[in-house]
Amino acid sequence: MMVSLGVRVRRLRRTLRRWSVSPRLHAAGQGAACAGGGLVLAAASLGSIPQPLALGMLLSLSGWSAVLLALGAAAGYILFWGAAGAQGVVWIMLGLGIVLLVGDGALRARFPLLMSAFGALLVSASGLVYLLWMGDETRFAPYLLRVCLAFGSTAVFEAAAKRQDSALRWPVQGLFVLALAQISVTPWVNFGCAAGAYLSCAGALPAAALAGLALDLAQVTPVPMTAVLTAAYLIRLPRWMNNRLRTCAPAAVFLLVMALCGSWDLHPLPGIAIGCVAAVFAPQPLPFTRRRGESGVVQVRLEMAASVLDVTRDLIREAEEPPIDEAALLRRAIERSCSGCPCRKGCREKLDALPESLLHRPLGDGSDLPLTCRKSGRMLRELRRCQEQLRAIRADREKRREYRGAVVQQYTFLAAFLRATGDDICRRDFSGETRFRPEVAVCAASRERANGDRCLNFAGPRGRYFLVLCDGMGTGAEAAEEGRRGAEILRRLLGAGFPSEYALRTVNSLCALRGLAGAVTVDLAELALNTGRATVYKWGAPPSYILAQGEAIPVGSLTPPPGLSVTDGRETVQKLSLRRGETLVLLSDGAGGEEVLRRVFGASEGSPGELASKILEAGFSDGADDATVAVVRLCPEAVGVG
């Protein structure tokens, strides 16, 4: 049977699409990109002196990505610089040690320039060691330039990795052009010139200008490349220019500028031509539909609103409560106990000398009072009443502190949310491509008419998917109402783009202020449909389980429930991967645990619905508590037949 060329092309297209959603190929591609990026950045130099750009990118990463980049960078320093690259290898090894030691935790978030400072410290310290003991002859100006590049490149790479903003990609592209300018297959093919020409044809004006500046700093040609690439970009702007003229603009402008300057150097021309051809076949970026002025105004307004919330929060936090006038309470107790006593004038001096510590200790039968009183019973009764008033005042103030802490916390959350929303509005790229599709099944059972467990699953912004399980403590209508209320609050906050940890702490504050400590427990699974990763948040809920490779792996541990305090308690967080078909199981208290999963583990090969029903059937036996089983599994997006 003959197969037409069109059928072969469609089959190849389907195969490529399947490969594009394969987690293994994505992981391999990311690893190769990290190692290749380190290899390229190791070639960067200024004045024939190696520069620590690879160290800057290394300090912006974490985990296996950092390890692979370190291997590529170390190989690059040895390959491009030989013995002169030994100091670069030292930078990379020390930087990798710091990355593995610091990790990707709260320390980086608390100190944004921490890794940049580490980069500058490593380069400066190693430079001094090589200068004093290794006979290095690097002068002060190149030494200072290295330190500044280590600090600046780390800050640029880290900001670009966190914010995913197009404006932050421009300096990153310029740094890579600076490194590529030192890599040539032959004297006539310079990869830096090719990258610069590509950016002038398919990039933004700042990217083209920075690429030209990088080529000038690398001294690849006496022709001013900044002027060449900037002018080539400006030629693209008139509407009457067709695509062919726009593509040929970098080469034509290079020849024109070369003739005007009188610096005849044709070596960069083949590389520029390669970059122009690559720009023809490269996919064009999607146009940005919103006008920058409008989005900028909205961002400024959101930032101003966030600043007002910050100021209000600080004022509430710094407000001081007046001290409790314990002396006045004691005087009032004395006046009540001594009213109508004929001896009160003679006891007046002794009564005024009574210490305020009487309000803080047990009074007993009055034998330990510092004076002899004819009406000791009445005196003790008034002092005990005064102690009760003092305890009530302290309890009331403690409750007010809880309210104040909740208000301060919410102002902090709202200010951060407004700033993040402003950044999203002005972001030029909205990469929310989903590569996985969630399969969710929920089964519940209850002896009561109202089930106290409430489970919701819904899609969130930017390719996020949420699975919420709220277990109202106990059974009946009251437990069902608490579970429904907690799940609904989380659905609204998460659907609006509120960060998961902020949403959970909001539920905790509401429970604490209403005096409903332990009224509900929360299980929250946040799935990233573009990467296949999941983050499981728990607050008072029993452990969840991952079914993979023939075993049930517990996720999280049992913690105190929300509502005990506004500020003291917090959720537990555990990150995991569902890219390889793993199954995540969330259980409420009445659905059993690990023993039940072991008995029905053979059902994990079936669909999530079959697995959920079998777990519920095996775990819901006595019916003492409501039972809910939620099962989620990520599958690659279905590829249509061409």
Image (cartoon, rainbow, N blue to C red):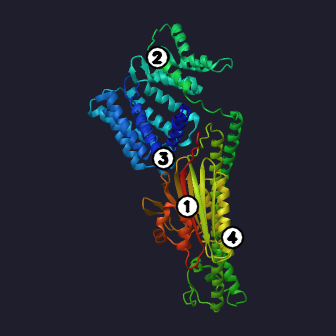
- On-image quarter of the C terminus: top right
The three-letter amino acid code for the residue at tag 1 is Pro
Q: Is residue 561 above or below residue 532?
A: below
How far separated are the C-alphas under marks 4 and 2? Answer: 72 Å
Percent across and percent down for residue 375 are 65, 91
Q: Is residue 325 visible?
A: no
- Quarter of the image where one finds residue 614: bottom right
Q: Is residue 613 visible?
A: yes
How far separated are the C-alphas under marks 1 and 4? Answer: 27 Å
Question: Where is mark 3, residue-wise?
Answer: 23
The three-letter amino acid code for the residue at tag 4 is Glu
How far separated are the C-alphas under marks 3 and 4? Answer: 41 Å
How far separated are the C-alphas under marks 2 and 1? Answer: 57 Å
Percent across and percent down for residue 485 are 68, 66
Question: Where is mark 2, residue-wise?
Answer: 270
Query: Which disc is residue 481 wearing?
Result: 4
Q: Nearer the viewer, residue 629 or 191?
A: 629
Q: Nearer the viewer, residue 593 or 326?
A: 593
Percent across and percent down for residue 639 are 57, 44
